Image: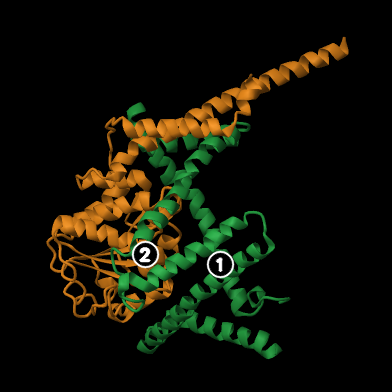
Amino acid sequence: MIFLKRTLPLVIAFVMGIVAISIYYIPHQAAVDLNELLSKWDRIIAAFAAFLGVYSLLYLHAGRLKRRQVGWGYSVFVYLGFVVMLTAAIYNNGAGPLVALRKGGAYDWLYTNVFVAADASMFAILSFFIASAAYRTFRARTTEATILLVAAVIVMLGRVPIGALLWESMPELQQWLMNVPNMAAKRGILLGVYLGAVATALRIIFGIERSYLGGDE
Amino acid sequence: MIQKLLNIDRRWIFLFIFVGVAAAMLSPLPLPIRPSSDVKNVYNTIESIKGKPNATVLLSFDYGPGSEPELQPTAISIIRQCFRNNIKVVGMALWPDAVGLAQAAFDSVSRAEGKEYGKDWTFLGYKTGSVTLILNMGEDFHGAFNVDYRGNKTSEMPVTQHIAKLGSFDYVVTLAAGKTIDGVWVTYAVDRYRIKLGGATTAVTSPDMFPYLQSGQLNGLVSGLAGAAEYETLVRTQGSATRGMQPQSAAHLIIIISIIIGNTMYFVQRRRDRRQSVSGNEETRS
């Protein structure tokens, strides 16, 4: 069991990691073909993640319903939404599930009038919370906070046309803030992130990082 | 009084935002929209390929309905610009929930501009893999997408039959809500296959893109609703982004006013607290 649960996944991670890195630097048709084959395998495996995601979501909400946890009513909507959308997608306006989605059917209607509208509204609600948070917490308590506050006000004004109406140079000043201080900070952060990603990848390939195996590893 | 204002019920702030945004939507006050250089770069790149035989642009729809208000107007404007210049457009999606949005954008513009499916444009749909899909496209486009969303063979359609690999596209534009621009397109398509890439992203993601703009890995960027409005200005169409500039300006102003009032109250309160503590100390001494 230890071989299947630990040794085999570690060997696969090591071999595939080394192969995937190596073929990137080998300018030969065989390497290109192997890369294409491996990436097709990867896409097939990735497709199964959708099933895992659906199972995980439904399992989580089934538990909430079973325990009558606070807010269990929302879990009913999860199941309702899932069943209704799935049924509409399989029916596909009478064409069945094996052809591309037909326009004008129940799925199309639900997507446009429920899913798109609800998702966009969720995002739009952020505006209300940002205003509330800005009023309550955005305070010029220190020099750093004051610099951040002034920069935020310039960017907020410079990004919308009313900023140019208030002061002609506002968009240029906003653009400078984005192009110079923002870019410098972002570049530093990104370098750190990607160096960390390389280190993590190497740790996984060489079996030092084993948390992906789950359990006590 | 000041303490009360500092601890104001947040529903009042919600109400101010609602009234401000609603008033801005109802009272049309035309605002000047000046396209930025980053937006112009995307527009000019598409303009530069017009007249080229089989000029084709790849549009990748990498966003969901939550970002539809910000990114859909840009998608529509780019498709419109391409169609008006007789540039072919190929659409694809790295996000599954973008399929309906892409179809809606293509359907509305192709109908308005009188363009034919399969000849002037096509939509390939969604495929899993993200990074690996890009790698497949980089080596063999027809292998990665052998059929389009409607089941037509890509090797037989006039719009895609001349496309051998990712590099065959004259320009690639990704409309992305998440980390798809830098995590997928820049890293794998630009650096490996040397394609020319433009991006459109939500306002919240755009600050992350500036290092790639400076390095030239991204040749232009349409950022958020404001960028979409700038693009609409360039293609001379007043769409939802241009109309959205008034409520967005109002919302930004209200947020700034909230910050100013909040800080004023805070400093007044702090000064009072200091005075009280000083007078308290003097009383104790005396």
The green-coloured chain is labelled A
Helix, strand or loop at mark 1 = helix
The colour one sees for chain B in the rendered image is: orange
* Badge 1 and badge 2 both on one subunit: yes
Tell me the amino acid under the disc marked 2. Tyr
Choose the circle earlier in sequence order: 1 or 2: 2
In the rendered view, does B82 fall on the left or right side of B275? left
Q: Quadrant of the C terminus of chain A?
A: bottom right
Tell me the amino acid under the disc marked 1. Ala
- Height in image: B246 above or below A184? above
Helix, strand or loop at mark 2 = helix
Q: Which mark is residue A197?
A: 1
Residue under pointer 2: A107
* Mark 1 vs mark 2: in front: 2
Label 2 chain ID: A
Residue at the location (40% across, 52% down)?
A117
In the rendered view, does A205 fall on the left or right side of B155? right
Mark 1 surroundings: few (<14), some (14-19) or many (≥20) residues within 10 A:
few
